[in-house]
Amino acid sequence: MSRGSGGTSSVTMRDVAKAAGVSIATVSHVINDKPGARIGDDARRRVHDAVAELGYRPNALAKTLSQGGSRFIGLVADQIATTPFAGQIIHGAQDEAWRHGYVLLVANTDGNADAENEAIAMMLEHQVRGILYSSWYHREISVPEQLELTDTVLVDCFARGSGLCAVVPDEEQGGRAATEKLIAAGHQRIAFINTTTPSPAQTGRLAGYRAALDAAGIEHDPSFVLDASPEQEGGYGAAGRIVESGVTAVFCHNDRVAMGLYDGLREHGLRVPDDVAVVGFDNQEVIAAHLRPPLTSVALPHYDLGVVGVRILLGLDTADQAIPTLVACPVIQRQSV
Amino acid sequence: MSRGSGGTSSVTMRDVAKAAGVSIATVSHVINDKPGARIGDDARRRVHDAVAELGYRPNALAKTLSQGGSRFIGLVADQIATTPFAGQIIHGAQDEAWRHGYVLLVANTDGNADAENEAIAMMLEHQVRGILYSSWYHREISVPEQLELTDTVLVDCFARGSGLCAVVPDEEQGGRAATEKLIAAGHQRIAFINTTTPSPAQTGRLAGYRAALDAAGIEHDPSFVLDASPEQEGGYGAAGRIVESGVTAVFCHNDRVAMGLYDGLREHGLRVPDDVAVVGFDNQEVIAAHLRPPLTSVALPHYDLGVVGVRILLGLDTADQAIPTLVACPVIQRQSV
DNA sequence: CTGAAAGCGCTAACAA
DNA sequence: TTGTTAGCGCTTTCAG
């Protein structure tokens, strides 16, 4: 701790007014640089001096109370601890909110409905301008009722028919970009290890894979599309089938699968990227950047999801309530292709 | 968005009072269950009914204004995006804050001094009860001046002579626990791959390693302590030296090093844990849980750092200002030992 | 048991 | 150009 004034910064506008020998209204005017009010240079200077001397700091809460609308934006997240993903959403949301004079109120709910309701209630009581409701992975959710009580935008999740705007990653474009990267490197026999978990990622990335193949005039070989659990184990287990299939490149549903695949491939005596090129998805730094060779991967735009979420909430960007707003997933090039 | 009342929830205490046919003070009393005030059962019920019917929601900001101290705790973080670590600090801080009726105001500064000052200023203006100043990895920092203006506790960092309380992981205990785990498994020839980066982790974990050896009466072999860059590459590069040293177990400075070591060991034809046992540090889920075999690792208690930080800030726990409060690092057992 | 009134720190007309 | 005044929504004495 420290000298801690403990909260209320004690020195108020009235103190400043007194010290500067002006009225409290004048202080308000010069502090906020009110356009309408013309203040004498002299008074203005005295106020500034007093502010500096007293260490005056406006009370944002009081300001909010008298002005009406608050400067808070609530962000409720189901998971902020497990992965860096949610952290990036917070980061993006916070940066953008800040840029517009807003402050983030964060709540973690662990996916627990009670915590969620409590969190939303608390935000409502703090008069948030609106709420960003986020998930740490892209999926369809059902919206807590309370959310209807304020402006809400869904981040990295969506709820059909809820009438709420949603911002999600463009899985299809990402899958397509990954595949195109492989095609551009000269590959024609390209496998896709998809996840066994039903999700927008599952269908979207597959669609993107197919679209890229179509666009390049490459025939689909259904045996090139495998399913595996979306983890290291899945990728490792798929290695045998990959080798048999005779492909020269594989697009993995995510980086963890790619990591497992690396291991499996190595055991089969194959080298990346010489024998088989690999592209991952998620761009999990800790994995992708440090595998040998470093893994080319498609990044999920979590930071941007946060940014766009705030922009939509604030009405800075317009969004369709019927269909989620898509944010592009960029390819991060490393050495596995 | 939605039906969005857009912020001010419009229905106020006065409305409730009117609807219930009582005075505004009475409403306040029943809503807050004020002990001193005895309210007639009848009036009480009418108020509750009115609240329910009107969907009244107290305005936390107004309450704060009139009561004095606010219910905010500020958390300024240098990085919330890069790793899950900061996310866990936020999570722990949020849970504990919540438990005591506080709400977290989060700001990310990217280590940028301007952003930092702006963040702190904003928090001060919001009358935060205090500020948690956190780093995403354990280190000594210099404290921004502004922090002196309020109660502050340092989380996962410290500043000697600042007079501020700090909460950090107990690196030494962690290093010791890791080594003991290896000793308990019957190992005597135990290497430690330390980082080349000066830090509390570097000295603390080494001290713990030595302490464990001492306690077990195992002689130190200086050649068993290696240095490597704290990443996969470092661990991979150290494999050769490990093999030559003839140790049967190695404690790695972190999980990434262990991951690299796994690869190097495999290339030398050695298997984990049969030929050499490995323990990591950091317990980075995405790595540790999914290597083959899964890696036993020491966890950094980020969640608890957040919790304890809040407790100290709120005066629930007492802490020494001179020396950082240590939080234990638990061993997470998997299959690499 | 309940209500009237003052005040938290600030803003915003409206006077002067 | 500046000061007065009335709130913002709520808590809190202090009367009735």
Image (tube, coloured by chain):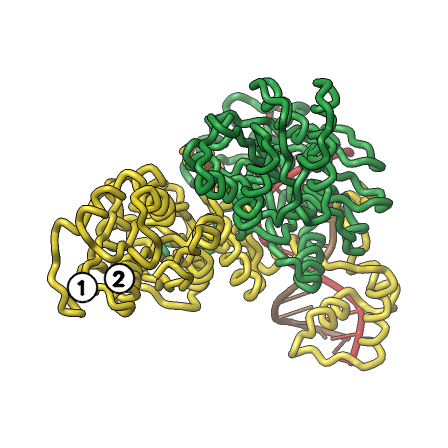
Chain colours: A yellow, B green, C brown, D red
Chain bearing tag 2 is A
How many numbered marks appear?
2
The crowd level at tag 1 (other Cα within 10 Å; few <14, some 14-19, many 20+) is many
The type of residue carrying mark 2 is: Thr
Residue shown at the point (76%, 79%) measured from the top left: A39
Sequence-first tag of 1 and 2: 2
Instruction: Please give the label number shown on residue A213.
Output: 1
Circles 1 and 2, Cβ within 8 Å, touching? The answer is yes
Residue A54 locus on image (x, y percent): 86, 60
CA gap, disc 1 and disc 2: 8 Å
Residue B225 locus on image (x, y percent): 68, 37
Q: Is residue A118 left or right of residue B172?
A: left
Residue shown at the point (56%, 19%) measured from the top left: B185
Tell me which corner region of the image, top left, top right, bottom left or bottom right, holds residue B322: top right
Residue shown at the point (75%, 45%) measured from the top left: A7
Instruction: Please give the label number shown on residue A179.
Output: 2
Question: For the residue labelled by badge 1, is the local secondary structure a helix, a strand or a loop?
Answer: helix
Residue B21 locus on image (x, y percent): 50, 36
Residue B190 locus on image (x, y percent): 63, 29
The type of residue carrying mark 1 is: Leu
Residue shown at the point (18%, 46%) measured from the top left: A244
Q: Is residue A243 visible?
A: yes
